[in-house]
Image (tube, rainbow, N blue to C red):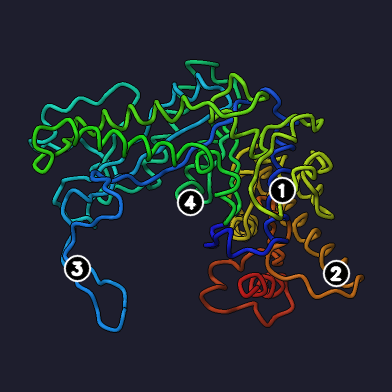
Amino acid sequence: MRAVAKVWDLTDAAVAEGVECFWQYCKSVQSTTPDAVWVNFDETPLWFAMAARQTNVARYRLRFKQPVRLVGKASLSRARITVGLSISTDSDFARAIPVFVIMRSSRVRDPRSRTPEEEDRRPTSAEWAEVEVPEGLEVHWQRNARMNEHLIGEWVGLLIQARDRMYGPGRVVVLVWDSFKAHLTEAVRILCAAHNIRMIVIPSGLTSLLQGLGTHINKSFKASCRSRWRRFLQDAADPAAAALGIQGFLHLIQGAAADSLRLVPSGRRLAGLCSGCASFLQNGLTNDLDGSEDDLINIRHRAVDSGRRVSLPCLEPRLPGAGIIEEAQAAVADAGYGSEWSDGAAVAAGSAIEDGEGSGEERAAMRSIVVARNDWVAGVRAASDASDSAPVRGFVGLPGQRRSTRAVGAALPKQDQCTGAGRDSGDSGGDHGSGLARSSTG
């Protein structure tokens, strides 16, 4: 999911397959939670100085028509921050979610000894002494002004608070965002699953086609920021000496975000909708399952056929033997992140079974999961052998539903792992050891 890719690096077949698989998963989520409210979140960089086609860094030209090389250091006017915007199928709910602003931390402590909580504190410098955060903005601080796992958790908390105020905690929120690594950490998955939030990850390389903020909002947001910045310079008595302070910059972000979220798309079918709401329909995420709104899809890529969406099945595709492992997981795990067992978790479960850790019910459930998963792997390999195709290796399945084909076995007892005993013998410990060796080498 995190493989770096751009849409122009993908073949037409890969783009078509990725978009259709994403539509199929969106239809399955929509069919199971028809009353859910959909939210899209994305981060975008912003600079204090927004002069286009200019640089304030010293430069000189190289010989033989080579490009210009920049030398020296940039001034503070080119300092970068991060702004996180949110759109939703409910425009009122989108306005209830604060604009997330991440600015640089002015603390001079050693970054290696600084915790995220210590970084994320309001600076005590003079430039922040009288700054008041405008309504609708949430300001945080980080050493490089970049998003991380801690700040993602803070934003998810704001999303939960806005949902509880408007709908109550029982309303399902479908959160759509890209495959940025801070979005997919275990802590974020557990937090979302515990508060009735379903995550949908846009496949790598398809963000420019499927993410509503990237297709409808971000460009207008930055254009509004640039327009307001130029207006500030024009109104200043001395534009050369004018400087936009932190208070003014926060008001600039507040006004630009409000302008971009109020934009209305063209078209009679979309009358009364803002651009954020319309992006879910024009990108094919929340269209009616009967296909009556598929003609609104407007993805500008030659490989994407909007007429294909109505023929895609609503349910998630299931691999042979997947039902067995899902029943075993449902007996012990919740419906969130804990229901997805990785290879390492299964091996740890086997080790807990042999070492006698946990209660009897937990050991029996863990054993059933390991057995069911190995049966599924054996079924996949048998199907591959019967069709005379290449041996199945690595991960199989569609994006978001991939499973590893590695065999899983219980680990050796701790004393045998240290001494190497039981590996060459014919007892159960030797069988477990060989299974673990196969699992670790793939």
Can residue 303 be seen in the rendering of this structure?
yes
Q: Are marks 1 and 2 in contact (CB under 8 Å)?
A: no
Q: Which residue is mark 4?
A: 180
- In space, the residues marked 3 and 4 are separated at their CA atoms by 34 Å
Q: Which residue is mark 1?
A: 364
User: Is 113 placed left or right of 358 in the picture?
Assistant: left
Type of the residue with mark 3: Arg
- Secondary-structure class at tag 3: strand
Q: Quadrant of residue 321?
A: bottom right
- In space, the residues marked 4 and 1 are separated at their CA atoms by 37 Å
Can you say whether 181 is above or below 132 in the image? below
Earlier residue among tags 3 and 4: 3
Within 10 angstroms of label 1, few (less than 14), some, or many (20 or more) residues? few
Earlier residue among tags 1 and 2: 1
Give the number of the disc on residue 40.
none
Give the number of the disc on residue 384.
2
Residue at the image position 51 percent from the left and 75 percent from the top: 418
Can you say whether 240 is above or below 12 in the image? above
- Secondary-structure class at tag 4: loop
User: Is 423 placed left or right of 92 in the picture?
Assistant: right
Type of the residue with mark 1: Ala
Residue 299 position within the rendered picture, expressed as x and y whole percent measured from the top left: 65, 45
Q: Nearer the viewer, mark 4 or mark 1?
A: 4
| Image quarter in which the C terminus is found | bottom right
Q: Quadrant of residue 435?
A: bottom right
